[in-house]
Image (cartoon, rainbow, N blue to C red):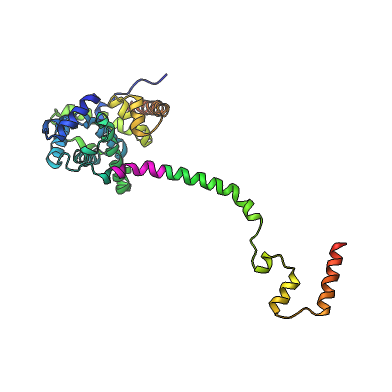
Amino acid sequence: MSDDDARLVQRALAGHAGAADALLRAHAGTAYAVALAVTRNPHDAEDVVQDAMVLALERLAECRDPRKFGGWLVRIVRNRALNHRRYLGIRAAEPLDDAGHAASPDSPADDAERADLRDQLTEAMSGLTPGQREVLLMHDLEGWKHREIGDVLGMPEGTVRYHLFNARRAVRARLQALVREEE
Amino acid sequence: MEPEPIDLSPLALPAHRRERLIGAVLARARVGVVQRTPLSELAGWARPTLAAAAVVAALSLGLLTRTGPAAAAEPLPLTVADALSIPGPASDWVAEDRPPTEEDLLAQWDEEMTDAR
């Protein structure tokens, strides 16, 4: 993966549009997850990711270790998301907006079910700290390893495990409580 | 004993929005337009350099704190007379630009005898 990134970075810098496209495609999910963890709003997360990716591509020559392009991009996304949250203040503290994915080509039934699940997860994650949300989304949604998350977020591997443990336990407990409330 | 992973896939960016996002980025970005320059290299070193400077400052403060009281224990002389350790009355006579009277000398002698006892 990292060698692939290094090759894609070199090719993108040489002017191959396909390489830039592949780089974005490989890391869009993680970038979005991190932005979502910080902003807690799908619209804001997409805006942040778009700006961060434009910046990353334009500054691609400054990526010191192209094998670690993913971590470098995540740091840019995270910084922009934090700035965005500070800038928006109160608005960023609002719960996730479920209109963010409304225009899906899926059937209305699929959409409704997905929206319901998303709302439950959003509600269950609302009590987590930003750090816990980042760790949980990067690990359980994007499949990053503890060490990789620690490198990017600047925390020891043990802290990553601790956040993940607490985040999973809190989310699961909240989800169970939500199910009981519905019954 | 980590709890089982949670299926967070409903929170993922849907494929059609991912495509739109990537398309928008590629339309806006000029890949590699910002080149690595000596200035950007220096900027990259700013953070570690500032960290090193902070460590040096902390060490210096520690040393100053340790040596400060010893140096401050002995106050600096304020006047030439203080620096030359000239007795107080003599420096007064110099300051007043007059020779000592017999009373002055007797008073000083008496004071020194009292101190000697």
Q: Can residue A181 be seen in this view?
A: no
Looking at the image, which is closer to me, A123 or A14? A14
Q: Quadrant of residue A13?
A: top left
Q: Is residue A156 left or right of residue B37?
A: right
The C terminus of chain A sits in image quarter: top left
Q: In which quarter of the image is residue A55?
A: top left
- Predominant SS of the magenta segment: helix
Q: In this view, does B114 lie to the left or right of B5?
A: right
Q: In this view, does B19 lie to the left or right of A97?
A: left
Q: Is residue A160 visible?
A: yes
Image location of residue B10, percent across then percent down: 24, 28
Residue at the image position 24 percent from the left and 31 percent from the top: A66
Can you name the residue that lies furthest to the top here?
A: B1
- Tally the marks: 0
The N terminus of chain A sits in image quarter: top left
Indicate whether B73 appears above or below A50.
Answer: below
Image location of residue A118, percent across then percent down: 26, 31
Magenta region: which residues? B41-51
Q: Does the magenta stretch include residue A106?
A: no
Residue at the image position 14 percent from the left and 39 percent from the top: B24
Indicate whether B25 appears above or below B104.
Answer: above
Residue at the image position 17 percent from the left and 33 percent from the top: B18
Image location of residue B35, percent across then percent down: 20, 42
Image location of residue A123, percent across then percent down: 32, 33
Q: Is residue B42 magenta?
A: yes
Looking at the image, which is closer to me, A175 or A66? A66
